[in-house]
Image (cartoon, helix red, strand yellow):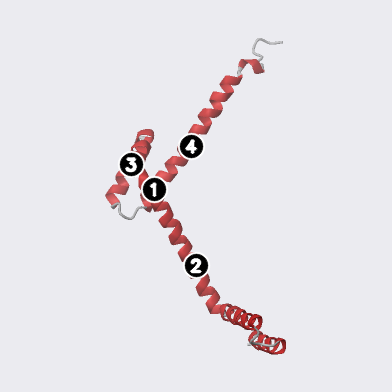
Amino acid sequence: MSDNLYLAYDYPLLGAFWTMMWIFLWILWIILLFRVIGDVFRDDSLSGWGKTGWTFFVLITPFLGIFVYLIARGRDMGRREQQAARARQEALDAYLRQTVESTGTVGHADELAKLSELKSKGDLTEAEFQHAKEKVLTS
């Protein structure tokens, strides 16, 4: 056998643990970097120069920039994320409402629900309910 043969015991378990920890911390830092930069550009109260300054600071001095940003502006990051999520949800709801109203299916569903409620109260007989239901579905 040659002298350059490397076996598993040349890389101990503690070394593997430290390697995995450093990889995890590196991935965590990358995620933090993207979250901070996303938060900088999401914030409407920050001016263009402020956004440029924070982005420059975070990219030039990465670790210090991220830690300073989290200390200075980290408290409101969650609030801005919630506002963005709420705005996305409201936009989706408005789009769906507009789409459904343009197809007219909301009217049919509402009318069928009202007919079903009237039938369950006993105000409509089964024959009247079926006739009204056919009328709604054919229109």
Q: Are marks 3 and 1 in contact (CB under 8 Å)?
A: no
Q: Earlier in the sequence, mark 3 or mark 2?
A: 3
Q: Could you give the CA–CA distance between mark 1 and mark 2, rounded to whole angstroms?
A: 24 Å
The amino acid type found where label 3 is placed reads: Phe
For disc 2, the marked residue is 93
| Between discs 3 and 4, the one toward the N terminus | 4
Q: Is residue 83 left or right of residue 46?
A: right
**In the figure, 104 relative to 7: above or below?**
below
For mark 4, give the secondary structure: helix
- In this rendering, the label closer to the viewer, 3 or 1: 1
The span from disc 1 to disc 4 (Cα, nearest Å) is: 17 Å
Question: Of the residues shown, which amino acid type is indicated by label 2?
Answer: Asp
Query: Tag on residue 56?
Result: 3
- The image shows residue 22, relative to residue 45, as above or below, that is above
Eyeballing the image, is 69 above or below 42? above
Q: Earlier in the sequence, mark 2 or mark 4?
A: 4
For badge 1, the amino acid type reads Met
Q: Closer to us: mark 3 or mark 2?
A: 2
Q: Is residue 123 left or right of residue 77?
A: right
Q: Pointer 2 and pointer 4: residues touching (CB < 8 Å)?
A: no
With 37 as the anchor, is 13 left or right in this view?
A: right
Determine the CA span between mark 3 and mark 2.
Answer: 37 Å
Q: Are marks 1 and 2 in contact (CB under 8 Å)?
A: no
- Which corner quadrant holds the N terminus? top right
Q: Earlier in the sequence, mark 1 or mark 2?
A: 1
Q: Secondary structure at mark 2?
A: helix
- Residue 63 position, x and y percent, is 38, 34
Q: Residues under labels 2 and 4: Cα distance?
A: 33 Å
